[in-house]
Protein backbone atom coordinates (compact mmCIF):
# COMPACT_ATOMS: atom_id res chain seq x y z
CA UNK A 1 0.00 0.00 0.00
CA UNK A 2 1.22 3.44 -0.81
CA UNK A 3 2.53 5.84 1.80
CA UNK A 4 0.00 8.53 1.01
CA UNK A 5 -2.90 6.12 1.30
CA UNK A 6 -1.64 4.80 4.59
CA UNK A 7 -1.27 8.23 6.06
CA UNK A 8 -4.70 9.26 4.81
CA UNK A 9 -6.23 6.18 6.38
CA UNK A 10 -4.38 6.92 9.57
CA UNK A 11 -5.75 10.45 9.53
CA UNK A 12 -9.21 9.07 9.03
CA UNK A 13 -8.85 6.36 11.69
CA UNK A 14 -9.47 3.71 9.08
CA UNK A 15 -6.34 1.59 9.44
CA UNK A 16 -6.94 -2.09 10.05
CA UNK A 17 -4.41 -4.19 11.94
CA UNK A 18 -2.54 -5.13 8.83
CA UNK A 19 -2.38 -1.59 7.57
CA UNK A 20 -1.38 -0.33 10.99
CA UNK A 21 1.63 -2.61 10.91
CA UNK A 22 2.54 -1.29 7.49
CA UNK A 23 2.08 2.25 8.71
CA UNK A 24 4.36 1.65 11.66
CA UNK A 25 7.02 0.43 9.30
CA UNK A 26 7.07 3.74 7.45
CA UNK A 27 10.47 5.37 7.74
CA UNK A 28 9.04 8.63 9.04
CA UNK A 29 6.61 6.99 11.45
CA UNK A 30 8.31 8.56 14.46
CA UNK A 31 8.30 11.97 12.88
CA UNK A 32 4.61 11.67 12.16
CA UNK A 33 3.81 10.67 15.71
CA UNK A 34 5.92 13.52 17.07
CA UNK A 35 4.21 15.98 14.79
CA UNK A 36 0.83 14.64 15.73
CA UNK A 37 1.52 14.95 19.43
CA UNK A 38 2.86 18.45 19.07
CA UNK A 39 -0.20 19.45 17.09
CA UNK A 40 -2.44 18.59 20.02
CA UNK A 41 -1.04 21.60 21.89
CA UNK A 42 -2.54 23.83 19.25
CA UNK A 43 -6.02 22.78 20.18
CA UNK A 44 -8.41 25.68 20.34
CA UNK A 45 -9.60 26.72 23.72
CA UNK A 46 -12.69 25.00 24.96
CA UNK A 47 -15.78 26.40 23.33
CA UNK A 48 -18.71 26.58 25.73
CA UNK A 49 -21.64 26.11 23.41
CA UNK A 50 -24.30 26.60 26.08
CA UNK A 51 -22.82 29.86 27.29
CA UNK A 52 -22.34 31.12 23.75
CA UNK A 53 -25.93 30.27 22.94
CA UNK A 54 -27.08 32.26 25.95
CA UNK A 55 -25.09 35.22 24.75
CA UNK A 56 -26.47 34.98 21.25
CA UNK A 57 -30.04 34.70 22.51
CA UNK A 58 -29.46 37.70 24.74
CA UNK A 59 -28.14 39.70 21.83
CA UNK A 60 -31.07 38.62 19.72
CA UNK A 61 -33.61 39.50 22.37
CA UNK A 62 -32.11 42.89 23.04
CA UNK A 63 -31.88 43.66 19.34
CA UNK A 64 -35.33 42.32 18.62
CA UNK A 65 -36.73 45.76 19.28
CA UNK A 66 -34.28 47.22 16.82
CA UNK A 67 -35.10 44.70 14.15
CA UNK A 68 -38.77 45.51 14.62
CA UNK A 69 -38.08 49.22 14.46
CA UNK A 70 -38.85 49.32 10.77
CA UNK A 71 -42.41 48.18 11.33
CA UNK A 72 -42.63 50.33 14.43
CA UNK A 73 -41.59 53.30 12.35
CA UNK A 74 -44.40 52.60 9.91
CA UNK A 75 -46.85 52.19 12.77
CA UNK A 76 -45.79 55.52 14.19
CA UNK A 77 -46.32 57.27 10.88
CA UNK A 78 -49.69 55.59 10.54
CA UNK A 79 -50.63 56.70 14.03
CA UNK A 80 -49.70 60.31 13.31
CA UNK A 81 -51.65 60.21 10.07
CA UNK A 82 -54.63 58.68 11.85
CA UNK A 83 -54.54 61.39 14.48
CA UNK A 84 -54.26 64.12 11.85
CA UNK A 85 -57.09 62.64 9.86
CA UNK A 86 -59.38 62.17 12.84
CA UNK A 87 -58.56 65.67 14.05
CA UNK A 88 -59.39 67.00 10.59
CA UNK A 89 -62.57 64.94 10.48
CA UNK A 90 -63.47 65.99 14.01
CA UNK A 91 -62.94 69.68 13.43
CA UNK A 92 -64.74 69.74 10.11
CA UNK A 93 -67.75 67.90 11.42
CA UNK A 94 -67.62 69.68 14.73
CA UNK A 95 -70.63 71.73 15.65
CA UNK A 96 -70.20 75.44 15.15
CA UNK A 97 -71.10 77.38 18.24
CA UNK A 98 -71.88 81.05 18.64
CA UNK A 99 -72.27 82.42 22.11
CA UNK A 100 -73.08 85.89 23.21
CA UNK A 101 -72.25 87.18 26.64
CA UNK A 102 -74.09 89.66 28.80
CA UNK A 103 -74.89 92.90 26.95
CA UNK A 104 -73.60 91.45 23.70
CA UNK A 105 -75.40 90.74 20.43
CA UNK A 106 -74.18 89.09 17.32
CA UNK A 107 -75.17 88.37 13.75
CA UNK A 108 -74.65 84.91 12.32
CA UNK A 109 -74.87 83.81 8.71
CA UNK A 110 -75.81 80.19 8.31
CA UNK A 111 -74.34 78.12 5.44
CA UNK A 112 -77.35 78.67 3.18
CA UNK A 113 -77.52 82.43 3.68
CA UNK A 114 -80.20 82.22 6.28
CA UNK A 115 -79.33 84.72 8.96
CA UNK A 116 -79.67 84.76 12.70
CA UNK A 117 -79.53 87.72 15.06
CA UNK A 118 -78.46 86.45 18.42
CA UNK A 119 -79.58 88.41 21.44
CA UNK A 120 -77.58 88.78 24.63
CA UNK A 121 -76.53 85.73 26.73
CA UNK A 122 -77.57 83.21 24.10
CA UNK A 123 -76.00 80.24 22.39
CA UNK A 124 -76.54 79.00 18.86
CA UNK A 125 -75.14 75.65 17.75
CA UNK A 126 -75.28 74.15 14.28
CA UNK A 127 -73.34 71.69 12.15
CA UNK A 128 -71.86 73.00 8.93
CA UNK A 129 -71.20 69.62 7.32
CA UNK A 130 -74.68 68.30 8.01
CA UNK A 131 -76.32 71.49 6.85
CA UNK A 132 -77.15 70.26 3.36
CA UNK A 133 -78.86 67.19 4.74
CA UNK A 134 -80.68 68.84 7.55
CA UNK A 135 -81.10 72.43 8.48
CA UNK A 136 -81.11 72.35 12.22
CA UNK A 137 -79.86 74.66 14.93
CA UNK A 138 -79.86 74.37 18.69
CA UNK A 139 -80.76 77.49 20.53
CA UNK A 140 -80.59 78.54 24.08
CA UNK A 141 -81.62 82.13 24.63
CA UNK A 142 -83.16 84.46 22.13
CA UNK A 143 -82.61 84.82 18.41
CA UNK A 144 -84.30 86.25 15.35
CA UNK A 145 -84.18 84.11 12.25
CA UNK A 146 -84.46 85.02 8.60
CA UNK A 147 -84.62 81.65 6.93
CA UNK A 148 -83.75 81.21 3.27
CA UNK A 149 -86.12 79.11 1.19
CA UNK A 150 -85.32 75.41 1.19
CA UNK A 151 -86.14 72.26 3.06
CA UNK A 152 -87.60 72.51 6.50
CA UNK A 153 -85.59 74.36 9.10
CA UNK A 154 -85.60 73.33 12.74
CA UNK A 155 -84.77 75.34 15.82
CA UNK A 156 -84.36 73.04 18.79
CA UNK A 157 -84.67 74.46 22.27
CA UNK A 158 -84.91 72.89 25.68
CA UNK A 159 -88.61 73.70 25.74
CA UNK A 160 -89.78 72.94 22.22
CA UNK A 161 -88.91 72.58 18.59
CA UNK A 162 -89.67 75.29 16.06
CA UNK A 163 -90.09 74.14 12.48
CA UNK A 164 -89.89 76.70 9.75
CA UNK A 165 -90.97 76.81 6.16
CA UNK A 166 -89.04 79.81 4.82
CA UNK A 167 -89.76 82.80 6.97
CA UNK A 168 -88.74 85.30 9.62
CA UNK A 169 -89.37 84.61 13.24
CA UNK A 170 -88.11 85.23 16.74
CA UNK A 171 -87.47 82.51 19.31
CA UNK A 172 -86.98 83.36 22.93
CA UNK A 173 -86.25 80.60 25.38
CA UNK A 174 -85.29 81.67 28.89
CA UNK A 175 -85.91 80.32 32.38
CA UNK A 176 -89.59 79.42 32.60
CA UNK A 177 -90.14 81.37 29.40
CA UNK A 178 -90.57 80.25 25.80
CA UNK A 179 -91.82 82.62 23.16
CA UNK A 180 -92.01 82.31 19.39
CA UNK A 181 -93.18 85.14 17.22
CA UNK A 182 -93.66 84.70 13.50
CA UNK A 183 -93.01 87.76 11.37
CA UNK A 184 -93.27 86.29 7.90
CA UNK A 185 -94.17 82.96 6.32
CA UNK A 186 -95.23 80.03 8.44
CA UNK A 187 -93.78 78.63 11.62
CA UNK A 188 -94.65 75.43 13.43
CA UNK A 189 -93.96 75.12 17.13
CA UNK A 190 -93.83 71.68 18.70
CA UNK A 191 -94.43 71.83 22.40
CA UNK A 192 -95.21 68.70 24.42
CA UNK A 193 -95.29 66.87 21.09
CA UNK A 194 -98.08 69.03 19.81
CA UNK A 195 -97.48 71.27 16.83
CA UNK A 196 -98.95 74.75 16.63
CA UNK A 197 -98.76 76.65 13.35
CA UNK A 198 -98.02 80.35 13.52
CA UNK A 199 -98.96 82.78 10.78
CA UNK A 200 -97.29 86.16 10.43
CA UNK A 201 -97.94 88.21 13.54
CA UNK A 202 -98.85 85.15 15.60
CA UNK A 203 -97.19 84.70 18.95
CA UNK A 204 -96.65 81.51 20.88
CA UNK A 205 -95.85 81.96 24.56
CA UNK A 206 -95.24 79.46 27.34
CA UNK A 207 -94.84 81.05 30.74
CA UNK A 208 -94.08 78.91 33.79
CA UNK A 209 -95.16 75.88 31.79
CA UNK A 210 -98.55 77.34 30.84
CA UNK A 211 -99.62 78.30 27.37
CA UNK A 212 -100.74 81.89 27.20
CA UNK A 213 -102.85 83.12 24.32
CA UNK A 214 -101.84 86.56 23.29
CA UNK A 215 -102.75 89.30 20.94
CA UNK A 216 -101.16 89.66 17.56
CA UNK A 217 -97.73 91.14 17.03
CA UNK A 218 -97.86 94.23 14.86
CA UNK A 219 -94.17 94.93 14.42
CA UNK A 220 -92.29 93.62 11.40
CA UNK A 221 -89.31 92.45 13.41
CA UNK A 222 -88.45 92.02 17.07
CA UNK A 223 -87.68 95.26 18.86
CA UNK A 224 -84.40 93.96 20.32
CA UNK A 225 -82.89 94.16 16.86
CA UNK A 226 -83.21 97.92 17.35
CA UNK A 227 -81.64 97.76 20.81
CA UNK A 228 -84.90 97.77 22.69
CA UNK A 229 -86.71 95.15 24.73
CA UNK A 230 -90.47 95.23 24.56
CA UNK A 231 -92.89 93.49 26.89
CA UNK A 232 -96.58 92.99 26.55
CA UNK A 233 -98.46 92.00 29.72
CA UNK A 234 -95.57 90.00 31.06
CA UNK A 235 -94.64 89.38 34.70
CA UNK A 236 -92.31 92.04 36.06
CA UNK A 237 -89.67 89.43 36.95
CA UNK A 238 -89.26 88.60 33.24
CA UNK A 239 -88.57 92.28 32.64
CA UNK A 240 -86.03 92.36 35.45
CA UNK A 241 -84.13 89.25 34.29
CA UNK A 242 -84.00 90.58 30.73
CA UNK A 243 -82.75 93.89 32.08
CA UNK A 244 -80.04 92.11 34.07
CA UNK A 245 -78.98 90.22 30.96
CA UNK A 246 -78.79 93.29 28.79
CA UNK A 247 -76.80 95.42 31.18
CA UNK A 248 -74.89 92.75 33.12
CA UNK A 249 -75.98 94.01 36.49
CA UNK A 250 -77.82 92.65 39.51
CA UNK A 251 -81.17 94.01 40.52
CA UNK A 252 -82.63 93.68 43.99
CA UNK A 253 -86.34 94.08 44.39
CA UNK A 254 -87.59 95.50 47.65
CA UNK A 255 -91.27 95.60 48.42
CA UNK A 256 -92.28 94.91 44.81
CA UNK A 257 -94.72 92.33 43.47
CA UNK A 258 -92.65 90.55 40.84
CA UNK A 259 -95.66 88.89 39.27
CA UNK A 260 -97.48 92.04 38.34
CA UNK A 261 -97.83 92.43 34.58
CA UNK A 262 -95.78 94.96 32.73
CA UNK A 263 -96.27 96.44 29.31
CA UNK A 264 -93.59 98.67 27.91
CA UNK A 265 -90.02 98.67 26.71
CA UNK A 266 -86.51 99.69 27.64
CA UNK A 267 -83.51 100.65 25.55
CA UNK A 268 -80.23 98.70 25.54
CA UNK A 269 -78.05 101.73 25.03
CA UNK A 270 -78.60 103.97 28.04
CA UNK A 271 -78.87 102.54 31.54
CA UNK A 272 -80.46 105.61 33.13
CA UNK A 273 -83.07 106.04 30.45
CA UNK A 274 -83.77 102.31 30.55
CA UNK A 275 -84.13 102.30 34.33
CA UNK A 276 -86.56 105.16 34.17
CA UNK A 277 -88.64 103.33 31.56
CA UNK A 278 -89.18 100.32 33.79
CA UNK A 279 -89.57 102.15 37.10
CA UNK A 280 -91.46 105.37 36.50
CA UNK A 281 -94.67 103.74 35.13
CA UNK A 282 -94.91 101.59 38.26
CA UNK A 283 -93.96 104.35 40.67
CA UNK A 284 -90.76 102.66 41.74
CA UNK A 285 -87.64 104.35 43.10
CA UNK A 286 -84.20 103.13 42.17
CA UNK A 287 -80.72 103.53 43.60
CA UNK A 288 -77.38 102.48 42.06
CA UNK A 289 -74.33 101.16 43.84
CA UNK A 290 -71.61 99.74 41.60
CA UNK A 291 -73.19 96.90 39.62
CA UNK A 292 -76.13 96.47 41.91
CA UNK A 293 -79.34 98.33 41.52
CA UNK A 294 -82.01 98.35 44.14
CA UNK A 295 -85.61 98.93 43.14
CA UNK A 296 -87.88 99.98 45.92
CA UNK A 297 -91.66 100.02 45.79
CA UNK A 298 -93.54 102.88 47.34
CA UNK B 1 -41.42 17.89 3.74
CA UNK B 2 -44.07 19.88 5.59
CA UNK B 3 -41.91 19.46 8.65
CA UNK B 4 -39.23 21.74 7.23
CA UNK B 5 -41.85 24.47 6.91
CA UNK B 6 -42.94 24.01 10.50
CA UNK B 7 -39.40 23.90 11.82
CA UNK B 8 -38.67 27.47 11.08
CA UNK B 9 -35.28 28.91 12.02
CA UNK B 10 -37.22 31.81 13.54
CA UNK B 11 -38.46 29.52 16.26
CA UNK B 12 -36.17 29.60 19.22
CA UNK B 13 -35.96 25.87 19.81
CA UNK B 14 -35.04 25.31 16.18
CA UNK B 15 -32.51 28.10 16.31
CA UNK B 16 -31.01 26.71 19.50
CA UNK B 17 -30.67 23.24 18.07
CA UNK B 18 -28.93 24.61 14.99
CA UNK B 19 -26.66 26.58 17.26
CA UNK B 20 -25.83 23.57 19.40
CA UNK B 21 -25.12 21.52 16.31
CA UNK B 22 -22.79 23.89 14.50
CA UNK B 23 -21.48 26.61 16.82
CA UNK B 24 -18.54 24.60 18.12
CA UNK B 25 -17.51 23.39 14.67
CA UNK B 26 -17.84 26.88 13.31
CA UNK B 27 -15.73 28.27 16.10
CA UNK B 28 -13.01 25.68 15.55
CA UNK B 29 -13.10 26.21 11.82
CA UNK B 30 -12.59 29.96 12.29
CA UNK B 31 -9.97 29.41 14.94
CA UNK B 32 -7.83 27.08 12.84
CA UNK B 33 -8.27 29.17 9.76
CA UNK B 34 -7.67 32.64 11.14
CA UNK B 35 -6.14 32.23 14.55
CA UNK B 36 -7.57 33.61 17.72
CA UNK B 37 -6.66 37.30 17.57
CA UNK B 38 -9.53 37.86 15.15
CA UNK B 39 -11.95 36.77 17.88
CA UNK B 40 -13.57 33.67 16.39
CA UNK B 41 -16.03 33.55 19.30
CA UNK B 42 -17.40 36.98 18.47
CA UNK B 43 -17.68 36.07 14.82
CA UNK B 44 -19.64 32.96 15.69
CA UNK B 45 -21.99 35.10 17.70
CA UNK B 46 -22.34 37.69 14.95
CA UNK B 47 -22.97 35.04 12.35
CA UNK B 48 -25.75 33.48 14.41
CA UNK B 49 -27.32 36.85 15.14
CA UNK B 50 -27.32 37.44 11.38
CA UNK B 51 -28.92 34.03 10.94
CA UNK B 52 -31.67 35.08 13.33
CA UNK B 53 -32.24 38.37 11.52
CA UNK B 54 -32.56 36.47 8.26
CA UNK B 55 -34.37 33.50 9.74
CA UNK B 56 -37.36 33.96 7.45
CA UNK B 57 -35.16 33.67 4.37
CA UNK B 58 -32.92 30.79 5.48
CA UNK B 59 -34.32 27.30 5.70
CA UNK B 60 -32.92 25.00 8.41
CA UNK B 61 -30.98 22.92 5.87
CA UNK B 62 -29.33 26.08 4.54
CA UNK B 63 -28.56 27.41 8.01
CA UNK B 64 -25.16 25.68 8.27
CA UNK B 65 -23.88 27.11 4.99
CA UNK B 66 -25.28 30.47 5.97
CA UNK B 67 -23.45 30.78 9.27
CA UNK B 68 -20.21 29.34 7.86
CA UNK B 69 -20.23 31.69 4.90
CA UNK B 70 -21.27 34.66 7.00
CA UNK B 71 -18.66 34.08 9.68
CA UNK B 72 -16.00 33.45 7.07
CA UNK B 73 -16.86 36.71 5.32
CA UNK B 74 -16.85 38.57 8.61
CA UNK B 75 -13.39 37.24 9.24
CA UNK B 76 -12.19 38.05 5.75
CA UNK B 77 -13.42 41.63 6.10
CA UNK B 78 -11.07 42.07 9.00
CA UNK B 79 -8.30 39.82 7.77
CA UNK B 80 -8.10 41.74 4.51
CA UNK B 81 -6.58 44.67 6.36
CA UNK B 82 -3.82 42.79 7.99
CA UNK B 83 -1.58 39.88 7.18
CA UNK B 84 -2.90 37.02 9.22
CA UNK B 85 -0.50 36.39 12.04
CA UNK B 86 -1.28 33.10 13.58
CA UNK B 87 -0.63 32.53 17.20
CA UNK B 88 -1.88 29.28 18.43
CA UNK B 89 -2.50 28.60 22.02
CA UNK B 90 0.70 28.62 24.04
CA UNK B 91 2.08 25.19 24.72
CA UNK B 92 0.32 23.71 27.63
CA UNK B 93 2.52 23.01 30.64
CA UNK B 94 3.52 19.42 30.72
CA UNK B 95 2.02 17.25 33.40
CA UNK B 96 5.15 15.20 33.60
CA UNK B 97 8.64 16.59 34.18
CA UNK B 98 10.92 13.62 34.04
CA UNK B 99 12.55 14.90 30.88
CA UNK B 100 15.98 16.22 30.35
CA UNK B 101 16.36 19.98 29.89
CA UNK B 102 17.81 19.30 26.53
CA UNK B 103 14.77 17.40 25.47
CA UNK B 104 12.51 20.15 26.76
CA UNK B 105 14.45 22.71 24.83
CA UNK B 106 14.27 20.64 21.71
CA UNK B 107 10.61 20.19 22.16
CA UNK B 108 10.11 23.89 22.65
CA UNK B 109 12.11 24.53 19.52
CA UNK B 110 9.97 22.03 17.66
CA UNK B 111 6.79 23.76 18.73
CA UNK B 112 8.04 27.10 17.51
CA UNK B 113 8.90 25.61 14.16
CA UNK B 114 5.56 23.92 13.96
CA UNK B 115 3.86 27.18 14.73
CA UNK B 116 5.62 28.94 11.90
CA UNK B 117 5.01 26.05 9.58
CA UNK B 118 1.31 26.09 10.37
CA UNK B 119 1.21 29.81 9.67
CA UNK B 120 2.70 29.15 6.29
CA UNK B 121 -0.04 26.76 5.27
CA UNK B 122 -2.87 28.10 3.16
CA UNK B 123 -6.10 28.82 5.02
CA UNK B 124 -7.79 25.93 3.26
CA UNK B 125 -5.01 23.49 4.15
CA UNK B 126 -4.78 24.62 7.73
CA UNK B 127 -8.48 24.54 8.54
CA UNK B 128 -8.91 21.05 7.14
CA UNK B 129 -5.69 19.69 8.60
CA UNK B 130 -6.27 20.95 12.13
CA UNK B 131 -9.91 20.00 12.22
CA UNK B 132 -8.82 16.50 11.38
CA UNK B 133 -5.71 16.26 13.55
CA UNK B 134 -6.75 18.27 16.58
CA UNK B 135 -10.51 17.94 16.63
CA UNK B 136 -10.43 14.37 15.32
CA UNK B 137 -12.98 15.00 12.62
CA UNK B 138 -13.35 12.49 9.81
CA UNK B 139 -12.76 13.64 6.23
CA UNK B 140 -16.44 13.22 5.54
CA UNK B 141 -17.47 15.47 8.39
CA UNK B 142 -15.03 18.17 7.30
CA UNK B 143 -16.25 17.85 3.73
CA UNK B 144 -19.81 18.46 4.90
CA UNK B 145 -18.85 21.50 6.97
CA UNK B 146 -16.88 23.09 4.18
CA UNK B 147 -19.21 21.99 1.39
CA UNK B 148 -16.41 20.33 -0.55
CA UNK B 149 -15.79 16.74 -1.58
CA UNK B 150 -14.14 14.17 0.68
CA UNK B 151 -11.44 13.76 -1.88
CA UNK B 152 -10.65 17.46 -1.71
CA UNK B 153 -10.41 17.26 2.07
CA UNK B 154 -8.04 14.35 1.82
CA UNK B 155 -5.93 16.27 -0.68
CA UNK B 156 -5.78 19.36 1.48
CA UNK B 157 -4.83 17.43 4.57
CA UNK B 158 -2.19 15.39 2.89
CA UNK B 159 -0.87 18.51 1.16
CA UNK B 160 -0.76 20.24 4.51
CA UNK B 161 1.19 17.39 6.04
CA UNK B 162 3.77 17.36 3.31
CA UNK B 163 4.21 21.12 3.51
CA UNK B 164 4.55 21.01 7.29
CA UNK B 165 7.15 18.28 7.16
CA UNK B 166 9.11 20.16 4.56
CA UNK B 167 8.94 23.46 6.42
CA UNK B 168 9.92 21.96 9.74
CA UNK B 169 12.93 20.28 8.17
CA UNK B 170 14.02 23.49 6.52
CA UNK B 171 13.61 25.71 9.53
Image (cartoon, coloured by chain):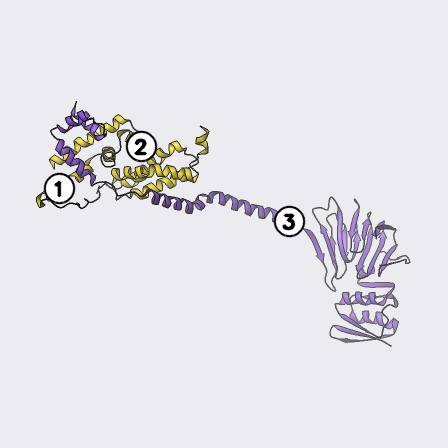
Chain colours: A purple, B yellow
Residue pointed to by mark 3: A90
Name the quadrant containing residue B112: top left
- Residue A197 image point, x, y percent: 87, 50
* Subunit under mark 2: B
The secondary structure type at the circle numbered 3 is: helix
Q: Is residue A153 above or below residue A293?
A: above
Left or right, A186 with respect to B128, comes to: right
- Residue B152 image point, x, y percent: 25, 27
Residue pointed to by mark 2: B145
Q: CA distance from mark 2 to mark 1?
A: 33 Å
- Residues tagged 3 and 2 counted as in contact (Cβ below 8 A): no
Q: Give the quarter of the figure containing the C terminus of chain A.
A: bottom right
* Subunit under mark 3: A
Q: CA distance from mark 1 to mark 3?
A: 87 Å
Residue displayed at 44% across by 45% down: A66
Residue A221 in view here: no
Same-chain status of marks 1 and 3: no
Q: Residues within 10 Å of mark 2 (few under 14, many from 20)?
A: some
The secondary structure type at the circle numbered 2 is: helix
Q: CA distance from mark 3 to mark 2?
A: 63 Å
In terms of depth relative to the viewer, which is nearer, B120 or A21? A21
**Outermost residue toward the front?**
A17
In terms of depth relative to the viewer, which is nearer, B76 or A64? A64
Residue pointed to by mark 1: B107
The secondary structure type at the circle numbered 1 is: helix
Q: Give the quarter of the figure containing the N terminus of chain A.
A: top left
Amino acid sequence: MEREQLISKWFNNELNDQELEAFKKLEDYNDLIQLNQALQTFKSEEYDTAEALDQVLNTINSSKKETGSWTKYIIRIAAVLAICFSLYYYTTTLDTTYTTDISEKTYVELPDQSTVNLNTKSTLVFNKSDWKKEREVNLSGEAFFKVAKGSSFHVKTKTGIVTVYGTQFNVKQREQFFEVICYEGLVGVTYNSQETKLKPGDRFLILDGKFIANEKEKNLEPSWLNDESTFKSLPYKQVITEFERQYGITINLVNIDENQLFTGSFTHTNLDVALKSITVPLHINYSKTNNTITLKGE
Amino acid sequence: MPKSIQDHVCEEHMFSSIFNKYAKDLHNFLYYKFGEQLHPKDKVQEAFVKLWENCAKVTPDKAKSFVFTTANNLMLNEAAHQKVILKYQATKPKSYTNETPEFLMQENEYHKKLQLALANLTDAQREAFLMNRVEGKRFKEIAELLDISTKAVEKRIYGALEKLRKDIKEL
